[in-house]
Structure formats: structure tokens, C-alpha cells
Image (tube, grey):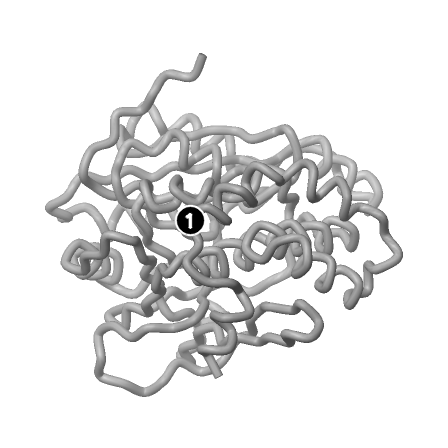
Amino acid sequence: MNKKVEIKSGLSIIIPFVLESPQVQFTVRALSEQLREASFNWEIIVVNNYCKEVSQQQARQGFTIGDDAGGNHLNSMCKYHSWLKYYEYKRKLSHWQSKNLAISKAKYSTLFFLDSHCLLSNGALVSMYDEFERLESMRGFSMHLPITYHILENKKLIYKLVAEVEKGNCGYSFTSAPDTSQILYKVPCMSTCGMMIEKRVLESIGCFPKELGIYSGGEQFLNFTMAVCGMNKYIFNGGVLHHHGAKRKYHWNFDDFHRNNVIAAYIYGGKYWANLRHINSKAAPLKFVGDVFSLNAQHRQLIKDMQIKTIQKWLSEQI
């Protein structure tokens, strides 16, 4: 039986990673320096997702099979830094399940998600947390940093909504952040990298679906589940997340990508929307939709009971 985590006021930073040494160590070090003078409690949770699926990918590509030094280094540093927690998720290659593991272990009431190859502008995280604490909502909300896709770029990006109602397609793409002096502004969708959210809010919508694999689906689920449940998303314009856009040492796969997106579509939109999404995708010949419905029925029912509008209604309001 898992020991119940006592939730306290403060910030838990969650970083999943796979074969990202030394980037992940630099990201953790930089975060700890940002937070050294913070007036609130904080911790950094790293989750190593090296697993059999990754080793199989290494073998197929002719690479040396095995984890890199990042996991051992971070794990060994936990005895010196009380704020650092190290876990491993080995069941399958899944960014989202690694996050779910960290969510279950997080001891603070507010969560911040970051990829393992990112740096924040000076003071961004403390300022963001202070603003987050001032913004109250009974229903719940999330707050996000604008992103520069490559580490040395200056152009700030956010997500824009991309939707085709007739095809059941609800997604996003990058667009330039608006030139505004507003410290906060509302958006229809945004990346989970650089996202701050209350743990109770994420748990109220079931966290990330347990059937999600490595790539895609998680952001579609979060953005549009929150939308149909009446939860807002805000950009915090008081800092920037600098992202290191580069090829990774693991990769997505076609079936998993489309299955993840049908899972998300089903949970926030129901069977009709999920079927529409599937038959209009490149994966239409694949026969996984029945399993998606049976394996995610409980999660769909949770959201159905919570939602205040359909995805079609919400999309019509964004035009």
C-alpha cells in the first residue's frame, strides 16, 4: 500500500527525463539557484524514464544499449540536497506516466512542470509563484511561461488553437507571443512545459490518462479537458522559459501517437468526438478505438460528470 503524502503549502517542480545527461543536471542546478532565496517551501522531483522500450530503440538504431550518467548522478546527489527527489518509471516509455508518478509523490500544493533541457530567465519562477498565489479560482486554472524554442533565441512563443470541428481535430501550434505589458493574459491552450497548477486541480481531473504512451495526447487532454470543465489558462508575462530544441536519444512511434490523441479526444469529447478524430486521421485503418473506450471509460465518466460544456460548444466560443 502506498503511503499517503501529506500535502503542504509550497512548490513541487517535476522533471521527467530519458537519456538527457548532462542537460538534466544543468536544469536542476539552475533551478536550485533560482530558488535559493525563495520565501516558500520547494522541492525538485526528477523521474528517470529509461526502460526496456528505450533499450530496444537503442538496439534497433545500433547504439550502445544502456542508460547514461544522468540518473546515477542525480540519485547520488539526493543525500546532499534535501530538496532533490529521484524516482524511476520503468513500466513503459511515457512522459505522462513519469509525470503521474511525480504528482503522486509531490508533497507541496502547487506543481510546476519542466522538461529536462530548459532554463528559466532570472527570477521567473519565484515571480510566477507569487503571482499564482494571488490569483484565486474555486474551479481551478493553470499558469504558463512563454517559450523560446531554442536556448539562445529571444523570440517568445505561445500556443494557438488549431481546430477542425468537422474532423474532430482539436490541437495547437506555436505562434508569436503578443507584445503586451499585461503581466497575465488568458489563452485557450498552452504547453505543459513551464506550467504551474494546483495539485488538487490536476487530481480532480484524474491526472494524465494512465493509458498514454510517450508522445502527444497529454497536452491535448489537459488543455481541452480543462476547457470543457470551465478552467482557464493564463500566460505569465513576467518571465521566459528557454527550451533546448534538439533531437533526443529516444523517439515516438506512429501507433502510439495516434492512440494517445484518440484517448485524449475520448476523455474530453466522448465517443462521437473520438471516433471522428480517428476516422479522419492517418491511423484510421488501425483497430484500437474499442480498447481506448474500454480502458478509459472511468476517466471519461469522471470528466463527463464535471464538464460544464461540450468541446463543440467551447470551440464555437473561441471563434
Q: Can the viewer see residue 216 in this picture? A: no
- SS class of the residue under badge 1? helix
Looking at the image, is 47 positioned above or below residue 255?
Answer: above
**Nearer the observer, 92 or 273:** 273
Q: Can the viewer see residue 169 in this picture? A: yes
- Amino acid type at mark 1: Met
Residue denoted by label 1: 306
- Name the outermost residue toward the right: 285
**Nearer the observer, 84 or 312:** 312
Where, by quadrant of the figure, is residue 247 drawn? bottom right
Residue at x 78%, y 55% (from the top left corner): 254
**Nearer the observer, 136 or 306:** 306
Looking at the image, is 306 positioned above or below residue 82?
Answer: below
Looking at the image, is 65 positioned above or below residue 159?
Answer: above
Residue 162: image x %, image y %? 57, 76
Residue 84: image x %, image y %? 33, 33
Residue 11: image x %, image y %? 25, 43
Q: Alpha-carbon neighbours of circle 1 within 10 Å: few (<14), some, or many (≥20)?
A: some
Residue 194: image x %, image y %? 39, 58
User: Which corner quadrant holds the N terminus?
Assistant: top left
Left or right of 166? Residue 36 is: left
Residue at x 54%, y 55% (from the top left corner): 268
